[in-house]
């Protein structure tokens, strides 16, 4: 009867308040430099301690430069925020990967990579893309700084249960179609508020067939579908991924854990408040045209016409988006030139993403006038890519090969677009100004980003892999 | 946290859907280590030209609405990033209440933690309130959390729903960490029963 979400939820309810609000136990708390300083300060002011430092883990990612790490951080505010985190983790005894450690990287890449994120856990972080970790079969969601402080002080959160949604994708995707396309298709279908109040369980043969990287890409963008969290039932692909990771259970403990993890599936008669079904064969390589992740069309399509909008408010909003994006209705997406290409982020910064992009780039060159950069999601992803020779493919093609961090996904560090610049980006948000004030973002898969780099325009990657 | 009881205030109309938290406060202003002082960055790209001068047509730059304490918007307000800097920026600007047909979950939650009341009302009612708000300073709305009503300038009372616990915490201006720590023994008991393999982050 219970869903996967219900099972994880029920296993973490510590107590209930008089109105039924649950005190939900949190197994893993990941923190970073941007949303934690005010929480540490709150603890200090109230004279509270951090309840379980050993359930907590800190990284620096949002602010860090992605250039030579031997050079001190130039930007004084970024440096201050990173130094503040370093002081806080020392004072409160939180385990931490410093900027110059080989394991440093984006929190949502590092968590799974290190085995800090495990099936069946509740995992939170002061970052909306915490939904990524749901790919392991965990309940993982983003929280604000007040809740970061609440978890630090109590190792719990006050929560009301979410509604259950199942998104099933059945069948096999065509060549050139990536997990990113599947997720953009889902967001295009249900909209950016489609998942509000729900936890989405991603199911169906197309999801089961994905590797962990693909599942993480899907769960990562649950928040772009408005959901509180996204998850995938753990299976042998999950267990094989977790086995041997530094913080994962070892030996007999691992076997015990797997025995429990195998129970983490929605029952056959589980009730979902909403069910959405997609056919994998219908999904083409996709690209966004507007300033919301739901504004998505096939790369073979044309820019939509506001005159065809459902109502006046929608028409005005579409026109505003097109003005911002510098696009005209009816224009072919595949004829839109790009100034920049960004491959990276917690959505698509894993080794599998590097491989997908490199396979398109091999033996090819970045088009003249295009600035193209790769920012691996972690130091370990970078090292792995270098071991496989992928860095040579990127560098030979004319890409910048940078150090790990959030980088141009959100433009907090110096990696930014200039006003009016257009970027083919593997990140997760195409909001106005997200990649730098006035910057224009088209979301797409790593292979599609590589294709755009080669031709200098948004391009159907299938033309390059025939 | 300042308690929220009754608010009689100017409401600013912002007839847009999907106002994301990057729009409420862009990421480059998140480098602070404090909660205060973010009001001047609220809605930065909508409020200022690239040279820093004000855009005179933006609602919060127009005379009565500079003093607005209520914001009225369309669907899915506060979507995107979890940054609590968004409610901090709104609060520092002076906004204590946001009325919209729907909110993104994390933003909705973050508002309550900072003494801001987010009110969900159907789109057609929001549109009526938006009209009221367009009349400017002579057209104040009353938000009464105790009675769970919004009072229009013509006296019409509109009821709204709010979670009972959140309402109580807002009315009393209570910190919910203190509330949870009353259950410390239950947390201790629960923690003691966790399997060993779930435990640590130290090697």
Image: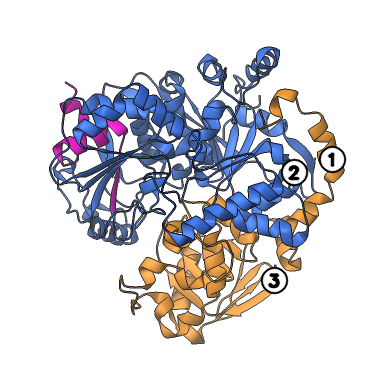
Chain colours: A blue, B orange
| Image coordinates for residue A26, horizontal then vertical, percent | 69, 38
Q: Quadrant of residue A42?
A: bottom right
Badge 3: chain ID: B
Identify the residue at horizontal 20%, vertical 26% (top origin).
Answer: A462
Numbered tag placed on residue B24 in the rendering: none
Q: Quadrant of residue B35?
A: bottom right
How packed mark 1 is, by other alpha carbons closer than 10 Å (few <14, some 14-19, many 20 or more), is some
Mark 1, residue position: B186
Tally the numbered discs.
3
Q: Is A444 covered by the magenta stretch?
A: yes
Mark 2, residue position: A23
Q: Is A210 covered by the magenta stretch?
A: no
Relative side of B45 to A275, left or right: left
- Report the Cα–Cα distance between label 2 and label 1: 10 Å
| Image coordinates for residue A334, horizontal then vertical, percent | 16, 40
Q: Nearer the viewer, residue A170 or A359?
A: A359
| Image coordinates for residue A135, horizontal then vertical, percent | 51, 29
Mark 3, residue position: B2
Are the two marked residues, 1 and 3, in contact with CB atoms closer than 8 angstroms?
no
Identify the residue at horizontal 60%, vertical 31% (top origin).
Answer: A116
Magenta stretch bounds: A440-466
- Helix, strand, or loop for circle 1? helix
Residue A383, compared with residue A297, is above or below; it is above
Q: Nearer the viewer, residue A32 or A278?
A: A32
- Helix, strand, or loop for circle 2? strand
């Amino acid at each position: 009867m219970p869903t996967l979400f219900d099972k994880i939820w029920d296993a973490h309810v510590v107590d209930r308040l008089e109105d039924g609000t649950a005190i939900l136990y949190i197994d893993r708390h990941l923190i970073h430099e941007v949303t934690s300083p005010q929480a540490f300060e709150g603890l200090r002011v109230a004279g509270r301690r951090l309840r379980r430092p050993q359930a907590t883990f800190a990284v620096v990612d949002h602010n860090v430069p992605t250039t030579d790490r031997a050079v001190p951080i130039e930007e004084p505010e970024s440096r201050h925020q990173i130094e503040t985190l370093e002081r806080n983790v020392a004072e409160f005894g939180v385990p931490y990967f410093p900027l110059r450690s080989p394991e440093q990287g984006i929190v949502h890449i590092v968590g799974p990579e290190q085995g800090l994120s495990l099936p069946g856990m509740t995992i939170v972080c002061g970052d909306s893309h915490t939904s990524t970790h749901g790919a392991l079969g965990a309940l993982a969601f983003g929280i604000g700084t007040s809740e970061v402080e609440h978890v630090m002080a109590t190792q719990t959160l006050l929560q009301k249960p979410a509604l259950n949604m199942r998104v099933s994708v059945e069948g096999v995707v065509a060549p050139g179609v990536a997990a990113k396309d599947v997720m953009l298709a889902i967001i295009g279908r249900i909209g950016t508020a489609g998942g509000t109040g729900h936890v989405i369980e991603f199911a169906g043969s197309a999801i089961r067939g994905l590797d962990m990287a693909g599942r993480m890409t899907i769960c990562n963008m649950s928040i772009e579908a408005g959901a509180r969290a996204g998850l995938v039932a753990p299976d042998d692909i999950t267990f094989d991924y977790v086995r041997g990771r530094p913080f994962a259970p070892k030996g007999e403990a691992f076997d015990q854990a797997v025995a429990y993890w195998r129970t983490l599936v929605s029952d056959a008669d589980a009730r979902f408040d909403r069910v959405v079904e997609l056919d994998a064969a219908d999904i083409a390589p996709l690209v966004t045209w507007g300033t919301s992740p739901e504004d998505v069309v096939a790369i073979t399509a044309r820019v939509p016409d506001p005159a065809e909008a459902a109502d006046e408010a929608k028409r005005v909003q579409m026109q505003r988006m097109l003005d911002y994006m510098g696009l005209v209705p009816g224009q072919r997406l595949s004829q839109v030139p790009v100034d920049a290409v960004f491959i990276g982020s917690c959505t698509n910064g894993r080794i599998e993403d590097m491989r997908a992009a490199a396979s398109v780039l091999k033996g090819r060159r970045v088009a003249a006038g295009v600035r193209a950069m790769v920012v691996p999601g972690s130091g370990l992803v970078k090292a792995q890519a270098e071991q496989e020779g992928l860095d040579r493919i990127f560098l030979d093609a004319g890409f910048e090969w940078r150090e790990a961090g959030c980088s141009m996904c959100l433009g907090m560090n110096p990696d930014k677009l200039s006003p009016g610049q257009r970027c083919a980006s593997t990140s997760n948000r195409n909001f106005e100004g997200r990649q730098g004030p006035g910057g224009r973002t088209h979301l797409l898969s790593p292979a599609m980003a590589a294709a755009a780099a080669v031709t200098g325009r948004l391009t159907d990657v299938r033309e390059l892999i025939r | 946290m300042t308690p929220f009881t009754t608010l009689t205030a100017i409401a600013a109309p912002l007839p847009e859907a999907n106002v994301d938290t990057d729009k409420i406060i862009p990421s480059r202003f998140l480098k602070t280590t404090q909660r205060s002082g973010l009001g001047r960055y609220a809605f930065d790209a909508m409020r200022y030209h690239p040279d820093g001068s004000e855009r005179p047509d933006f609602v919060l730059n127009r005379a009565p609405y500079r003093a607005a304490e209520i914001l009225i918007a369309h669907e899915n307000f506060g979507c995107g990033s979890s940054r609590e800097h968004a409610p901090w920026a709104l609060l520092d600007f002076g906004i204590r209440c946001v009325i919209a047909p729907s909110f993104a979950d994390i933003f909705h939650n973050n508002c309550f933690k900072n003494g801001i009341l987010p009110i969900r009302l159907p789109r057609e009612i929001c549109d009526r309130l938006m009209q009221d708000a367009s009349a400017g300073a002579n057209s104040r709305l009353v938000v009464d959390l105790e009675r769970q009503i919004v009072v229009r300038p013509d006296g019409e009372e509109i009821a709204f729903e709010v979670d009972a616990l959140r309402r109580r915490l807002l009315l009393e201006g209570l910190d919910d960490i203190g509330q949870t720590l009353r259950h410390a023994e239950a947390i201790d008991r629960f923690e003691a029963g966790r399997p060993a393999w779930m435990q640590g982050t130290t090697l």
